[in-house]
Image: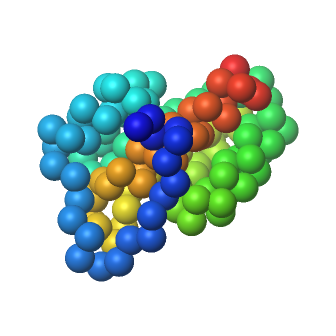
């Protein structure tokens, strides 16, 4: 099943993180524009202006709330957005991170690319 067809599942403490091989597979197979940075995945995006970057972040917030899984978000240099994902309860990456990354990638491609 594609990650876009899944929903994030609630995580409790003790949820095991994915191993590096599984994380790298999901990254390359499902969200290749994202990069792994240790126990995180991240994506850097550049928009035409500050207002568009903020609109994107608002849309990200809506999706994150619907999924119950929230990225770290940084707007910098006025039109650059960095998204970082990790499942804090697991202390690393879980499938939820990749599900949300796939949905945020679709948002970017459909409305902002």
Image-quadrant location for residue 15: bottom left
Q: Residue furthest front?
A: 1
Note whether residue 82 is visible: no
Residue in view at x 15 percent, y 38 percent: 21
Viewer-nearest residue: 88 or 48: 88
Instruction: From the top left corner, tell me how far across and down residue 61 is, in percent.
Output: 68, 56
Colour scheme in the image? rainbow
Task: Name the residue: 66% across, 52% down.
Answer: 63
Q: Which residue is nearer to you in this view: 13 or 43?
A: 13
Q: In this view, does 10 lie above or below 24?
A: below
In the displayed image of the protein, which residue is found farthest to the right? Answer: 51
- Is 10 placed left or right of 93 in the picture? right
User: Which residue occupies the foreground of this view, 57 or 1?
Assistant: 1
Where's the C terminus, which quadrant? top right
Measuring from the top left, give residue 46's x and y in whole percent: 64, 27
Is residue 93 something that shows in the picture? yes
The location of residue 5, given as percent across then percent down, is 53, 41
The residue positioned 20% from the left and 41% from the top of the image is: 22
């Amino acid at each position: 099943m594609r990650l876009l067809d899944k929903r994030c599942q609630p995580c409790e403490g003790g949820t095991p993180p994915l191993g590096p091989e599984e994380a790298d597979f999901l990254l390359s197979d499902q969200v290749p524009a994202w990069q792994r940075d240790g126990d995180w995945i991240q994506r850097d995006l550049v928009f035409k202006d500050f207002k568009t970057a903020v609109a994107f972040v608002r849309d990200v917030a809506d999706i994150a709330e619907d999924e119950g899984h929230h990225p770290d978000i940084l707007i910098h240099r006025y039109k650059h957005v960095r998204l970082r994902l990790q499942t804090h309860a697991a202390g690393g990456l879980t499938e939820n991170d990749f599900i949300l990354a796939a949905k945020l990638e679709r948002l970017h491609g459909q409305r902002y690319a």
